[in-house]
Structures are given as C-alpha cells and as structure tokens.
Image (cartoon, grey):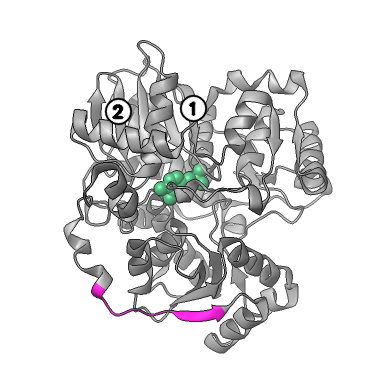
Amino acid sequence: MNYLSTRGLPTQGSTPRGFSDILLEGLAPDGGLYLPERYPQVDESTLARWRGLAYADLAFEILCLYIGDLPRSDLRVLVDKTYTKEIFGTSEITPLKVLEPGLWLQALSNGPTLAFKDMAMQLLGNLFEHELARRGETLNILGATSGDTGSAAEYAMRGKRGVRVFMLSPIGRMSPFQQAQMFSLQDANIHNLCVEGVFDDCQDIVKAVSNDLDFKRRFRIGTVNSINWARLLAQVVYYFAGYFQATRSNQERVSFAVPSGNFGNVCAGHVARMMGLPIERLIVATNENDVLDEFFRTGAYRVRTSADTHETSSPSMDISKASNFERFVFDLLGHDAAAAARTRQLFGEDVPRRGGFTLTPAEFSRVPEFGFVSGKSTHADRLATIRHTAEHHGITLDPHTADGLKVARSLRRPGETVLVLETALPIKFAATLVEALGREPERPAAFAGIEQLPRRFERIAADAGAVKAFIAEHCTA
Ligand SMILES: *Cc1c(COP(=O)(O)O)cnc(C)c1O
C-alpha cells in the first residue's frame, strides 16, 4: 500500500511512499496529510472471518491491509505485545457496556493513562522503536499538550530505545491527576517542560522549533500529534471490535457517537466505514468549541482564533481548528487528483488567508453519503448527562464521554443502535465530577496516591530559544 497527500503529492512526481516512510513524519512535504491511495475493501466473507477474532488478531488483520513494507512476523510481535490484558485491563481490550437496549458505551480508556489515546499511542511506541532500530536512528519527540496527549505519548515512549520525549505543557493548567500522571514518570528519556504560558504558547513553540529546519535536522525532531497516519490506523480497529460485539450478524448496521476535537477519533470511524464496515451514521459530538458542528450543519469551516476558543470542562475537545478534518474533506471531494487540487485551495490558501471556507452546495450535499451528522453539548448538558447516567445506569462518565452521550441521545432515531465511544475515565477530571455528583469519582487501584509521588519536571520560559537550548543540552546531536 502506498500513501498520498491530501494536497496532491503524487502529481508532483515524488516517488511513492510506503507505511514505514510516513510513520515518522508529520505533515507531507506539500503541507497535506497522508492517506492511503485507496481504502482496502472488506467484503462479507472477510467480516465473517473477522467476527470472533481476539482484538490483537483483528488489529493484525487490519494493519496488514495498510502496511506492506514491514515483515508480517515483526508486525505480529508488535501487535501482540501492544494489545494485552495487562496493558488494557480486559481481554476484550475495548469492552461494551449496555446503557439501554440499542445504546452502548464502548470503553476505550482502560489503558495506562485512562484515555482513548492509549489505544493508538501504545502501538506507535512499539512501531517507532522497531523502525528506529531498523534504520539505526534516534528520534527526539517534541510535543505540546493540554493533558491527555502528553501523558499517552510519555507512557507509550517511556524506556523505549532510540526515542526521547520533550513534552511542553502550560504550567498549572492540567488537572492535578494529569499533572501527577506525567510528572511522576522517572524514565531518563522523558522530559516534562512546564511552560510559563498557556497551551497556545506551547503549540507556538513547537511550531517555531519545527520551522527551524536546521535545528530540526540536527536534533532529529519528530512529533506524535494526531495527524500521524499510524495513530489513525490503530484507531480503525476498535470500530470493527465494537461492531462485532454489538451485533450478531454482518447484516446489522450500527452508528457511533464520538466526542470530537481534532477529528482524529471519528476520522478513524470514517476510514472503517469507507472499508465497508456496516456503519449507519457517524455522530460527531463537540463541546462549546463547535467548529465541527458548524461545518456539518452549514458547510462552512471557520477556524477560531485563540480568543474565540473556550476553556471548557471537556478540555481535550477545546480546539480552534480540527487538524484531521482535511482528510475527510479530501475524501468528500472524491479522493483523486481533482480533489487534491481543491483541498490545496481550501486548506493551503483559504484557511491561512481567510480563516476558513464554505463548500459549494454541490460539494456539501454529498456529506450525508458519508454518514456524518453532528451536535453540540455545553457545560450544563455535560453535568446533567453525568448526573442522569449515574442515577439511572449506575455508571460514572467523564465529561467528554458525557458530551458524546448527550449528542447521541438527541440525534438517535427509533431502532438505531448507537455505540458511544468512552474517551476517558472520570478520575482524570475529578473537579467536574465533584461539581456534577458532589463526590470524587472512583480511582483505579493502580493510581492510588500518585499525587504524592516524587515529580520530575522543568519550569521553562515561553520562548522557543529556551526550549531549543534545553533540547540541545539533553541530547547528543
Ligand atoms: C483527545 C480527546 C478527545 C478528542 O479526540 P480527537 O481525536 O481529537 O477528536 C476527546 N476526548 C478525550 C478524553 C480526549 O483525550
């Protein structure tokens, strides 16, 4: 399988790129995002064969369709050591809980950092270590986090050979639990940098450092952000796993409701649907930062400014633009050379120059063919949903999952089977849970007293120069 860029890389005469080529890259050189040339089609007999496979076996089958340049036996080993009961808590890996007939929660957050990002990041850590060893290279991962991404990346990369992590976070802005998770790591290859600023400052520093091409090359700077194709691919697996658990035959169709920020999670659902998984609808749930809900209602994609980006009680969905969204637009426009030209205009010109774009009525009219619908949830909705679910179902939701359930309930049609993706455990966002329920959420035993563990972090000025100096000092160029 070869990969192309949403902005038309292959028509610029570059050599085809395989999975291993793009694994360690972020954006394509033309500024686009990588996608496979075509989506492998999963027919009836394949679905029948996959139903009943253990999670790791299913993951192996799906990954094999997209990874042509890694020995099968190596991939097998990497997948088997990633998706285990020891790491994800149950042998199902992503078990379902029923809320009421036809309405399910799919648990994606029983990995090491209690958020769904572990599902992909744990595999990425093993893939990176393998690929770097094969090439005889090392990589310094530089990232910015407001919480879940940073801890998922650090727990995936800790102790891995050939990889160092430099993770910037805004000082004092993460939840106490998230801070304890990250700062208690004692691994020598993990560096927590607490920036005297807000999340946008952290992101700006990452951009500034990455734009210094000489520094980037010299110190082999890489990223693990949500536009990485391997992360998206790993997430495709749990849509299949959820489908098989919720249905008895491959004639049934289900819908997924997905708490969304950067459009990574639900984009994986889109890929699963493009492959032929019988998905009826993909229900995009946003919080008050509703750039995606606005698009799916109107066809207008309007990037928010920092000042227009709200700090909400579902902070992992507080985004100003949805960085994976370009992938869907490229598919909507036809996934071909003409689509790439139009995508280049929309995301390469209109977004940076005019802050967004509006699709033509003809373009926008195709959205329903892709199953997408959307809705929005607010702080009050979130609290009400957490309360209602605790009272009526005895289940404690995290604020992001509550957004997903709220929107699922408001859009669900009679008879429609909906799986709401649970994206984090409530303990990560205890303050909001106390506000909703008047009590602290349950804490998994492995996390008892993590706030009391010794902490390892560096305080640093909101300045790219200071961050570069820190990196230079902590790795041998
Ligand atoms: C990252 C995250 C999201 C948003 O996922 P996207 O892939 O960015 O759409 C939602 N909920 C939680 C808990 C997260 O950590």
Q: Is residue 296 visible?
A: yes
Which numbered tag is attached to residue 282? 1
- Residue at position x 62%, y 66% from top? 201
Residue 193 percent location from the top left of the image: 50, 76
Residue closest to the eye, 295 or 369: 295
Which numbered tag is attached to residue 466? none
Residue 96 percent location from the top left of the image: 26, 34
Label 1 CB sits under 8 Å from any ligand 1 atom = no
| In the depicted structure, whether residue 115 falls above or below residue 276 | below
Q: Which amino acid lies under the numbered mark 1 shown in the image of this protein? A: Leu
Left or right: 191 with respect to 363? left
Q: Residue furthest top?
A: 414
Residue on which the image places disc 2: 104
Left or right: 4 with respect to 243? right
| In the depicted structure, whether residue 323 falls above or below residue 207 | above
| In the depicted structure, whether residue 266 falls above or below residue 183 | above
Quarter in which the C terminus is drawn: bottom right
- Tag 1 secondary structure: strand
Tell me the magenta residue range.
452-460
Mark 1 or mark 2, earlier in chain = 2
**Structural distance between the alpha carbons of marks 1 and 2:** 14 Å
- Residue at position x 38%, y 54% from top? 118
- Residue at position x 46%, y 36% from top? 378
Determine if the magenta segment contains residue 36.
no
Left or right: 79 with respect to 411? left
Quarter in which the N terminus is drawn: top right
- Tag 2 secondary structure: strand
Q: Which amino acid lies under the numbered mark 2 shown in the image of this protein? A: Trp
Q: Quadrant of residue 105?
A: top left
Residue 420 percent location from the top left of the image: 36, 32
